[in-house]
Amino acid sequence: MRTVPALILGMALTIPFTAFAQEEADPLAEYLWLQRPLVIFADTPNDPRFKRQMELLEDTPEELEIRDVIVVTDTDPAEDSALREKLHPRGFMLVVIGKDGKVAFRKPVPWSVRELIHAIDKIPMRQDEILESLGK
């Protein structure tokens, strides 16, 4: 399986999907209630949209870290990974999974960190986290 090597984006970690056991029933189970996976799919690591998305994530990774986002990439459709089975991507796609394990949103084009955090901050669980951090 060809994947993008693991990169440190500031404090946000990018993990190629090959790091996970393919037999696992839910490929994102280890993040349940702990982190929000941002899953980025492409048919090849050379896809310009994939490259652009990875560049955009480098802008302000600390904002993703504040929101408990972990970046997971899968750039090899021939591998037919458990993650692809679960999320059914077509070409480039980014998917944000909530801490509850449900798909929060999908996008067929790259998004800036600003767009991502704006959308994540609208998720009800994130709203609760914001209120809790304010002591309300």
Image: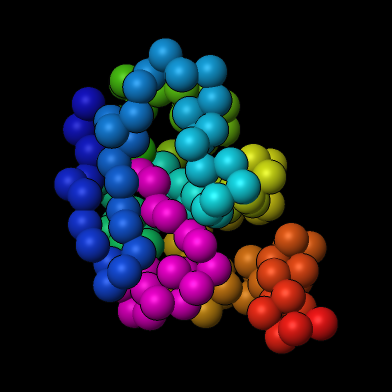
Q: Nearer the viewer, residue 127 or 56?
A: 127
**Compared with residue 90, is residue 119 higher up or lower down, i.e. above or below?**
below
Image quadrant in which the N terminus is located: top left
Work out whether residue 135 can be spotted. yes
Residue beneath the point at 29% across and 41% down: 16
Residue found farthest to the top: 23
Residue found farthest to the bottom: 134
At which x and y percent is residue 53? 37, 62
Q: Which residues are magenta?
A: 56-73
Residue found farthest to the front: 135
Residue beneath the point at 39% across and 46% down: 72
Q: Nearer the viewer, residue 110 or 11?
A: 11
Q: How is the image coloured?
A: rainbow
* Quarter of the view holding residue 131: bottom right
Image quadrant in which the C terminus is located: bottom right
Residue beneath the point at 44% across and 69% down: 65
Is 61 in the magenta? yes
At which x and y percent is residue 43? 34, 37
At which x and y percent is residue 123? 73, 63
**Compared with residue 49, is residue 114 higher up or lower down, i.e. above or below?**
below
**Compared with residue 130, is residue 79 higher up or lower down, i.e. above or below?**
above
At which x and y percent is residue 88? 55, 30
Report the side of 88 relative to 75 (left or right).
right
Report the side of 8 relative to 112 (left or right).
left
Work out whether residue 90 can be spotted. no
Is 52 in the magenta? no
**Compared with residue 114, is residue 33 higher up or lower down, i.e. above or below?**
above
Residue beneath the point at 23% across and 62% down: 8
